[in-house]
Image (cartoon, rainbow, N blue to C red):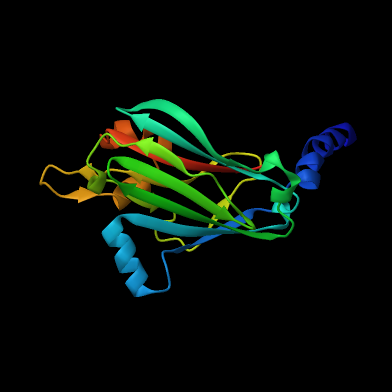
Amino acid sequence: MKLKFLLLLYFFLPINLFAQNPVKMTSHYGSDSSEINDLMEFESIYTETLYFESDSIRNKFYEINIREYKNGKFIRESNIFDGQESDHFKVNSHVESVKFFFSIADGKLKTFVRGRNFGSKKSYFKLFQNSDDYALKDFFGNKKEIEVPIGREFPAFAILTPMKHNDGSASYCEVVQSNIKPEKLGDFFHIPHYFIVMMKFK
């Protein structure tokens, strides 16, 4: 009996000793100015700030990639930002914020990330549907906060066209609020082309 207890202790202690605090993620969409929000809507510009809070992110870097899917198949992954390029980008607090900018117009998706004391390169991606059909959506749904992992990628945003119903109506939120894995959204909802923005603390 004592041996069994020691074996159980051996297997479970590392989990407790090395478990990291969960990372709380919250967001703020758009601008505090209604006039600016109206202008961004007119120009098909989207901005959303993600806030992260946890002792686990201190001294970590974060990486941002964008995955593209077409006709239900993964096409490519492109790096938008990788903090490990310099210690200057290391998170030095238990809180961090990252602001994302997306422009969807003229057949192109344009991305830009603003972090603490830096701005990323601007990246461009070709759109295969009408630009006005694409929209930016996050994965919060009706939640005010989400717990995200350390050391594993998690989806932050989707840039996608809507799911279309037989009655002619369409929905974006129904897609991103489902429990379908991001890489399966195209097949499940018959979405021909979309992007998923992925993040990772490492």
The foreground one among 33 and 186 is 33
| Residue 21 to residue 38: above or below | above
Q: Is residue 121 left or right of residue 57?
A: left
- Give the position of the C terminus as an image quadrant: top right
The residue sitting at the left extreme is 167
Q: Is residue 143 left or right of residue 153?
A: left
How far across and down, in percent of the image, does residue 10 sit? 84, 36
How far across and down, in percent of the image, does residue 123 sit? 46, 40
Labels in figure, total: 0
Q: Is residue 87 left or right of residue 83?
A: right
Figure quadrant of residue 45: bottom left
The foreground one among 133 and 58 is 133
Is any part of residue 202 visible from this angle? no
How far across and down, in percent of the image, does residue 103 sit? 37, 50
Is any part of residue 67 visible from this angle? yes
| Residue 194 to residue 144: above or below | above
Residue at the image position 31 percent from the left and 30 percent from the top: 187
Residue at the image position 69 percent from the left and 40 percent from the top: 84
Figure quadrant of residue 43: bottom left
Residue at the image position 72 percent from the left and 52 percent from the top: 56
Q: Is residue 72 left or right of residue 198?
A: left
The residue sitting at the right extreme is 2
Residue at the image position 65 percent from the left and 53 percent from the top: 22
How far across and down, in percent of the image, does residue 127 sit? 30, 37
- Give the position of the N terminus as an image quadrant: top right
